[in-house]
Amino acid sequence: MPSTAWLSTTLLVRTVVTADGRLLTARANENEDLFWGVRGGSGNFGIVTSLEYRLYERGPVFGGGVFYPVSKAVEVLRFFREFSENIPDELVIQGGSFNLPDNTPVFAVAACYCGSPSEGEKVLQPLRRFTTPLADALTVMDYLQLQSMFDPFFPPGRHTYVKSNFIRALDDDALLAIAEFAGKSPSGFSFAPFIEHWHGAATRVGVTDTAFPHRQHSYNLMFWSNWEGPSESEKNIQWTRDCWNALRPFLVEGSYGNYVSDEGDTFARAPTDQTSTAWSP
């Protein structure tokens, strides 16, 4: 039977060793600027030595993934866009192109419904029925089981290169342009392209409340390229950059700091507002 997990979703206190050797405690009423920065600013603040979170109990969830032929990428993306516009806060979905362990290229939608599993099954029925999938792996499971279900796709030792920006609007032109790259990676280990849907509580936080300002964009696009050896690096990095350059007209400049690869000092020092993040090739 699925068991209960504890989720840490609210940061209360963080202890940080700064670059000048000071040990600081950052919380809402102590070192407030540092506390603001570490909630969404990724790195460059210091070395974190301890964290204090508020924990939330989470029982079984209804989730997993539904896998479609990569040739249906446009159809799946259109459904993804329309379905995501009205989903409840309890549901999170992501979608993208990758290869199954048997090397079958797919375009899949992963989902997690953090509410009553029976209600989650009802909410996700449209995803299971809008077209015929290759496989349907949606079921009741532990939250921790769902969190680790894609771990086998990311074994230690793989090389990785990432490009990520938010999508200005997932209109038909953007959708068709993104789908054009599905199943085209030179490596069978890449998750590219991949789309995260942002909604619910995360979008109801003020833009200036934390160092993560990108609250108004519904979709984040990633090309998460993975490959096995250094001899494959050049072609995989170049493919990722070429895809990104082709899709620039559909993207805003803002990017989630945890997905930054080699953007360099210009990116790191850019003001953290929704339009000023620096581009790089």
Image (cartoon, rainbow, N blue to C red):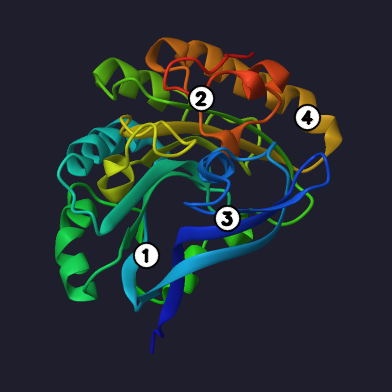
Can you give x and y, in whole percent of width and height, for residue 49 in the image? 72, 60
Q: Quadrant of residue 72?
A: top left
Q: Nearer the viewer, mark 2 or mark 1?
A: 2
Q: Residues within 10 Å of mark 2 (few under 14, many from 20)?
A: some
The residue that appears at 32% across and 37% down in the rendered structure is: 206
Q: Residues within 10 Å of mark 1 (few under 14, many from 20)?
A: few
Lower position in the chain sequence, tag 3 or tag 4 = 3
Q: Which mark is residue 272?
A: 2
The residue that appears at 43% across and 40% down in the rendered structure is: 96
> In the image, what residue type sits under mark 4?
Ser
Residue named by callout 4: 233
The residue that appears at 22% across and 52% down in the rendered structure is: 127
Per the model, the C-alpha gap separating discs 3 and 2 is 42 Å
Q: Is residue 1 above or below residue 31?
A: below
Q: Residues within 10 Å of mark 4 (few under 14, many from 20)?
A: some
Mark 1, secondary structure of its residue? loop
Quadrant containing the C terminus is: top right
> In the image, what residue type sits under mark 3?
Asp
Is the C-beta separation of discs 1 and 4 under 8 Å? no
Residue named by callout 1: 137
- In this rendered view, identify the residue nearer to me: 105 or 128: 128
> In the image, what residue type sits under mark 2?
Thr
Q: Nearer the viewer, mark 1 or mark 3?
A: 1
Q: Is residue 221 left or right of residue 198?
A: right
Residue named by callout 3: 102
Per the model, the C-alpha gap separating discs 4 and 2 is 31 Å
- In this rendered view, identify the residue nearer to me: 4 or 84: 4
Lower position in the chain sequence, tag 1 or tag 3 = 3
